[in-house]
Image (cartoon, grey):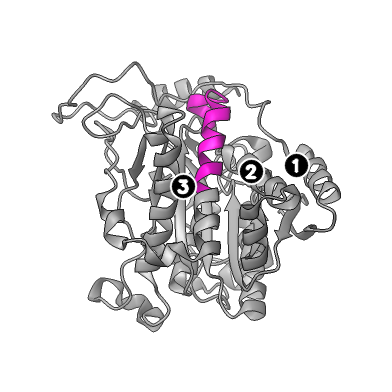
Amino acid sequence: MRRWQAWALATAVLGCAVTPAAATSSPAPAAPPPCSEEPRENSVTEFTSHDEMLVELDRIERISDGRVSVREVGRSHRGREIMSARVGTGPKVVLITAEIHGNEKTGPDAAMDVLEFLGTSESAKARQIRSELTVVAMPKINPDAGELDRRGNDLTWEQVQQEFPQLRGAPEPWNYYTGSRQGDDYSQRPGFDINRDYHPDLDYRPQRADFPGASDRPGWYLSPETRTVRDVYRALRAEFGTVDTYVDLHHQGACYTVPGTDRFVTLSLSGKFVADPSTPQGAAFAEFADTYRPEYSKQLNVAAYNALQSAANRNPDFGNITLYPQDVNLPGTGLGSFQLNGSGAVLFEVRGQTQTLGEQHREMLTRAVYIGLDGILSSVASGQVNHLDPARYDQIPPTQRGDQVLRTATDIE
Ligand SMILES: [Zn+2]
C-alpha cells in the first residue's frame, strides 16, 4: 500500500490524523510559509541506499591510503551488514551512529562525508583530528528500516520470543508497531522502534517482568541492531577506558520554526536525555551518578552550535538552529544509555523525515549535519571544547513547535 493511501485509510478508520493536532491557542509571532506534516509518498533515491553505502565505504577505505578501516560488525534481523568505519589513532574516541530510524536519511551521508574528509585531507585540521581522536562511524545502524524507508524494523514479537523463550507470555512491548504510523502500514509487517531498545546496563538480559516497558524506562537489547551498537560501544570502552563522545543523527518534524521568526528549523540539538541520576527523578539510575557528565554534553552541543552559526555567514539556513525539548527521560535510547555510562552525548534532529520532506533540501541539510559534526570533532581534538561555557547551551533558542506540542513517548523523533 502506498504511503498516502495508508494514511488516508488510517485517517478514515480512526477518525484522526497521524500528526496534525487540533489547533490550539498559541499564536505564532509570524505566519510561516506553508508546510505540512501529513505523510505522503516522496522519492528518496538521491539518498544512499544500503548497497550504495557498502560501495561508498569500500571506496573511502581504498582512497584513504590505510587511514580508514572499514569492517562488518554485525548483521541486521534480515541479514544486512552493519558496518563500522574507523579513522584516527588518538586516545579519545568519538562514536557516531545514524539512521536508527529508517526514514531519517541525511545522517549516513554526512557521516560518510566526514570519513572521506578525515581519510583523505592533508589539512592541519584533519591531521590534528586524526592524531588526537579515534573516530568510529556507523552510518546505517538499522538497514532493514532504511531499506523499507520507515521508522521501525520488521522484526516480530513472535521472533523475539523464539529467541528469548523466557519472554513467552510477556505483554507486547510498548514500542512494537502493528498499526499505522507516519503513513506506514505496520499491520502486514510489524516491527519495533529500536530507538528505545537500549539499556544503561550494557550486560542486561531481557526479563519477563520488565515488559511492556515505557518510554521513560530502559529497553532490553531485543534487536540484533542495538546489540551490535552496544557491542561496539563496549569494545571501545574496553580499549580506551571510556567513549569520550557519542553522537546520534536523527530527523524531526518538517514545520518547526525558530522562535520569533518564520524561519524553519534546519536542525535541533540536544545534550540531555535522562533525568540526572544524582536527583530523585533519576534515582532509578543512581548507580551512574559518578559517570554522568551533563556539563560536557552541553559543551559538545555548544561546539556544534557555534560551528553552524559561523557557517550562517555563507548560508543563513545554517543559523536556524534550536534546542530540542529538554523535558525528556529516555534511558532506552542509545544517547541516554551511553550518556549514563560516561559519554558526552549529542543529538542532531534534522528538519523533516522522508514522509514529509523526501529528498527536498537534501544537500543543505546534509551539509548542516557535516558542519555540526566537524565543529564537535575539531573542538574535541583541539581541546577547545573544555573552555566552552556550558551555560551557552541553555541560551540556544527552544524549538517553536506551533500547535505540534511534544507528544508523548513514541512521537519523539
Ligand atoms: Zn529519529
The crowding category of the residue bearing disc 3, from other C-alpha atoms within 10 Å (few below 14, some 14 to 19, many at least 20), is: many
The Cα atoms of the two marked residues, 2 and 1, are separated by 8 Å
State the residue in front, 77 or 349: 349
State the residue in front, 217 or 230: 230
Query: Cβ–Cβ below 8 Å for labels 2 and 1?
Result: yes
Q: Residue at x 32, y 56 (%)?
A: 328
Q: Is residue 8 left or right of residue 277?
A: right
State the residue position of label 3: 348
Position of the N terminus, as image quadrant, is top right
The Cα atoms of the two marked residues, 3 and 2, are separated by 12 Å
State the residue position of label 1: 53
Determine which quarter of the picture holds residue 188. Answer: top right
Where residue 214 appears, x then y in whole percent?
39, 60
Number of the label disc, if any, that sits on residue 67: none
Q: Amino acid at mark 2?
A: Pro
Chief secondary structure of the magenta span? helix
Position of the C terminus, as image quadrant, is top left
The residues colored magenta run: 354-373
Q: Residue at x 42, y 32 (%)?
A: 313
Q: Which of pointers 2 and 1 lies earlier in the amino acid sequence?
A: 1
Where residue 158 appears, x then y in whole percent?
63, 56
Q: Residue at x 21, y 26 (%)?
A: 23
Image: 59 above or below 271: above
